[in-house]
Image (tube, rainbow, N blue to C red):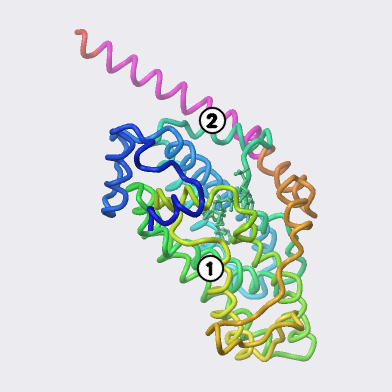
């Protein structure tokens, strides 16, 4: 595959690589895992820090739209399930920050970049969750899209990232099911509840398609990331798989995917469907989505409000280290 990409996409050809770069690429091509202390090209390290850092930020910012509904969940059981899910997302963020730290970047540096707007998080979390049905749609569609992207990442070339993904995918499957379960209840409920479910699907469909990134022709990083097996599929491949998986699920719910052009294409063995509005996507990732300011504001406030706790922890750690040092010297 790599040789073909070199020809078609203008990647660095094997003869232009240093012996070290060539040996590295050969390891990737043999499906070997790259581990933290091993040599890697700067670009590989930078791409991983960018992707894993953005992924970690997405998990953390992704708690906000759902956290919004914890106090208003319709039953005690739904509240307990949602609490557990949102807590899982925090855990995913922490595994991913820890995995990114093995590349020589600190969690504080990554968070600083999130807070000053120089690092991204997934576009999807800049949309509001207006009704309880939106919590169903987030679990069904957003976690569904996340799984579609993350299952292949379990085989990604960087060891700590691939291992983090194995655990994350297990939990995301539960999240997707809880979302679909909410949608089943709403879709089989009163006409008003079914209308809420349809409205949630209408609003979350295209933003979910955008989660996979721009179309392949506009994707900046895909070619190199795939050659390094940081990404396993192109954005369009995963988007297509997501549509093919989700359309029958919508049908089972008795809901309509908001796309007049959606049709099964026998020849290609997949659905033809309308592209999302890419102008909207680029506006959202540039900071101009419906909730960007609110989401970032909430994260910056949480960071500032938690300063006293971090300071206390550090003071305690320094004191303990000094005490241990004194004991060792005795
Ligand atoms: N949002 O060249 P490409 C979740 C940026 S986890 C924002 O194609 P790449 C769990 C991209 O960064 C969801 N920005 O980029 C959950 C680049 O800009 P840059 C997160 C986006 O990296 C569920 C530019 O566009 N998952 O949801 C987006 O090769 C429910 C050009 O794009 C991951 O992060 C976007 N959607 O491919 C939590 C998975 N798409 O950095 C709570 C790992 C693209 O040069 C509740 N990441 N951009 O300034 C990936 O697989 C890849 O990074 C892609 C993008 C596929 C997202």
Crowding near the residue tagged with mark 2, few <14, some 14–19, many ≥20 C-alpha atoms within 10 Å: few
Q: CA distance from mark 2 to mark 1?
A: 33 Å
- The residue that appears at 46% across and 24% down in the rendered structure is 314
Q: In terms of depth relative to the viewer, which is nearer, 62 or 313?
A: 62
Marks 2 and 1, the one that precedes in the sequence? 2
Name the residue carrying label 2. 109
Tell me the element at label 1: helix
Is residue 190 visible to the viewer in this orientation of the structure? yes
Query: Which mark, by number, is residue 237?
Result: 1
Instruction: Between residue 247 and residue 134, name the one nearer to us.
Output: 247
Task: Classify the position of the N terminus by image quarter.
Answer: bottom left
Question: Residues in magenta?
Answer: 302-326
Q: Secondary structure at mark 2?
A: helix
Residue closest to the eye, 20 or 15: 15
Q: Dot 1, crowdedness within 10 Å: few (<14), some or many (≥20)?
A: few
Image position, residue 256 (x, y; %): 72, 86
Residue beneath the point at 19% across and 8% down: 330
The answer to whether 75 appears left or right of 36 in the picture is right
Magenta stretch containing residue 310, yes or no? Answer: yes
**Vertical placement of 290 versus 260: above or below?**
above
Image spot of residue 62 (x, y percent): 61, 55
At 79% from the left and 48% from the top, the residue drawn is 288
Residue 285 inside the magenta-drawn segment: no
Q: In this rendering, is residue 193 above or below 207? A: below
């Amino acid at each position: 595959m790599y040789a073909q990409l070199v020809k078609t996409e203008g990647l660095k050809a094997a003869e232009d690589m240093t012996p070290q770069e060539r040996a590295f690429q050969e390891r990737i091509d043999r499906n070997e895992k790259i581990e933290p202390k091993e040599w890697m090209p700067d670009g590989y390290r930078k791409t991983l820090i960018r992707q894993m850092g953005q992924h970690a930020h997405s998990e953390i910012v992704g708690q906000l739209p759902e956290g919004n509904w914890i106090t208003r969940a319709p039953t005690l059981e739904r509240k307990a399930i949602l609490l557990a899910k949102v807590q899982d997302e925090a855990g995913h963020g922490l595994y991913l920050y820890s995995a990114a730290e093995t590349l020589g970047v600190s969690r504080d540096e990554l968070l600083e970049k999130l807070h000053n707007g120089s690092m991204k998080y997934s576009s999807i979390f800049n949309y509001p969750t207006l009704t309880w049905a939106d919590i169903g749609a987030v679990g069904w569609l957003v976690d569904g899209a996340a799984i579609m992207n993350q299952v292949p990442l379990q085989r990604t070339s960087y060891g700590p990232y691939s291992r983090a993904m194995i655990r994350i995918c297990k939990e995301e499957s539960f999240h997707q099911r809880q979302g679909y379960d909410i949608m089943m209840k709403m879709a089989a409920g009163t006409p008003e509840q079914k209308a809420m479910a349809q409205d949630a699907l209408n609003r979350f469909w295209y933003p979910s398609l955008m989660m996979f990134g721009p179309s392949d022709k506009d994707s900046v990083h895909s070619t190199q990331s795939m050659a390094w097996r940081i990404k396993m599929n192109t954005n369009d491949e995963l988007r297509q798989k997501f549509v093919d998986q989700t359309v029958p699920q919508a049908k089972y719910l008795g809901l309509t995917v908001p796309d007049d052009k959606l049709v099964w294409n026998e020849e290609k063995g997949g659905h033809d469907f309308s592209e999302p509005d890419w102008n909207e996507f680029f506006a959202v990732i540039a900071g101009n989505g419906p909730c960007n300011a609110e989401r970032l504001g909430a994260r910056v406030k949480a960071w500032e409000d938690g300063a006293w706790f971090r300071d206390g922890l550090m003071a305690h750690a320094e004191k303990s280290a000094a005490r241990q040092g004194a004991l060792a010297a005795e």
